[in-house]
Amino acid sequence: IDFKTTMASVEFPSIFLNASGVNCMTVAEMDEMINAACTGGVVTKSATPQQREGNPQPRYYQLEHGSINSMGLPNAGFPYYLDYVTKEHAKPTILSVAGLQMSDNIELLHKIQASEYTGLTELNLSCPNVIGKPQVAYDFEETDALLAEIFSFYTKPLGVKLPPYFDLVHFDQMAAILNKYPLTHINTVNSVGNGLWIDIDTEKVVIKPKQGFGGLGGAMILPTALANVRAFRQRLNPSIKIIGTGGVTSGKDVFMHLLCGADMVSVGTALLHEGVGIFQRLTDELAAIMAEKGYTSIEDFRGKVQDF
Ligand SMILES: CC(C)(C)CCc1c(C(=O)O)[nH]c(=O)[nH]c1=O
């Protein structure tokens, strides 16, 4: 079964990637992703201009059906990741960036534009906005203005990482904005924002930052992830590819993301729990499903989920 795919004329040897933030903080982790079986390449942790320690721990907690995190953008800093992706690797890289303020986003993309890097970049639109306003991706005017400024100078392959949306009108509004720009892809979904979990023995929340509020990942967000992949596939120009992220733990989940129209699939929570061996398992499980159904290529069913 041929799982390679092409995005922005970059050939990925497999459809599988890590979700930014997982298994991608250090050179060792990124090399491990690239060297693992059945991976398409690696997505870096979202890079900020300077190195960051991130939030106090515990900042990640495993739940029965997923995870909750408020990491606080710990990362080695933009130069570290730009240096890594600019080097030669056996598989493609996606450089993820996240400004802590709007000017950071512009500055980071100017630096990438001026650099030797020719691969894909992904702008994390869950980045913070001005105080008192929601994350950029939930501020449609701000998103439009930011993308307009970026594409006034940026000519390299660029995609955006999106949080989940929950209102069909928001899908319409966001897709209308994204369709205005020559994006290579969207990556949907980021964690489901501001969940909360409690340890009833101690009667305390389970993570220290933000009074226990954190982004949800893992199996419990799969229905939200599938809806976002399908909604954007239905609305976006075909030229904008989709990396489906969220809730993938098995070949069945991968199959559902692909039925909704995903071009590639990334794994976060389950990768953290299982390690990079998960990609061989997902490949084998997807291949078994395809064989059982008589599919010989992902093109036989990609985006072909049927209405009831
Ligand atoms: C949530 C932000 C800290 C603004 C961005 C980084 C990020 C984090 C994080 O570093 O806390 N966790 C996620 O699940 N998704 C993200 O995009």
Image (tube, helix red, strand yellow):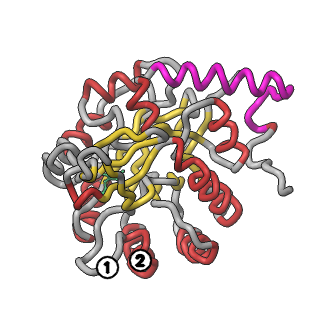
Q: CA distance from mark 1 to mark 2?
A: 7 Å
**Vertical comparison of 156 with 218: above or below:** below
Name the spot of residue 186 as percent of width and height, x first: 52, 55
Is disc 1 in contact with disc 2, using a CB cutoff of under 8 Å?
yes
Q: Quadrant of the N terminus?
A: top right
64 versus 8 height, above or below: above
- Magenta-highlighted residues: 277-299
Residue for point 63% across, 46% down: 262
Query: Does mark 1 have its CB less than 8 Å from ligand 1?
Result: no
| x and y, in percent, of residue 207 in the image | 25, 49
In this figure, which residue is indicated by the disc labeled 2?
A: 139
Q: Amino acid at mark 1?
A: Lys
Residue 53 seen = yes
Q: Amino acid at mark 2?
A: Asp
Label 2's element?
A: loop
Q: Nearer the viewer, residue 124 or 104?
A: 124
Q: Is mark 2 within 8 Å of ligand 1?
A: no
Q: Is residue 211 left or right of residue 149?
A: left
Name the residue carrying label 1.
133
Q: Earlier in the sequence, mark 1 or mark 2?
A: 1
Query: Based on the displayed image, in which of its 4 quarters is residue 43 positioned?
Result: top left
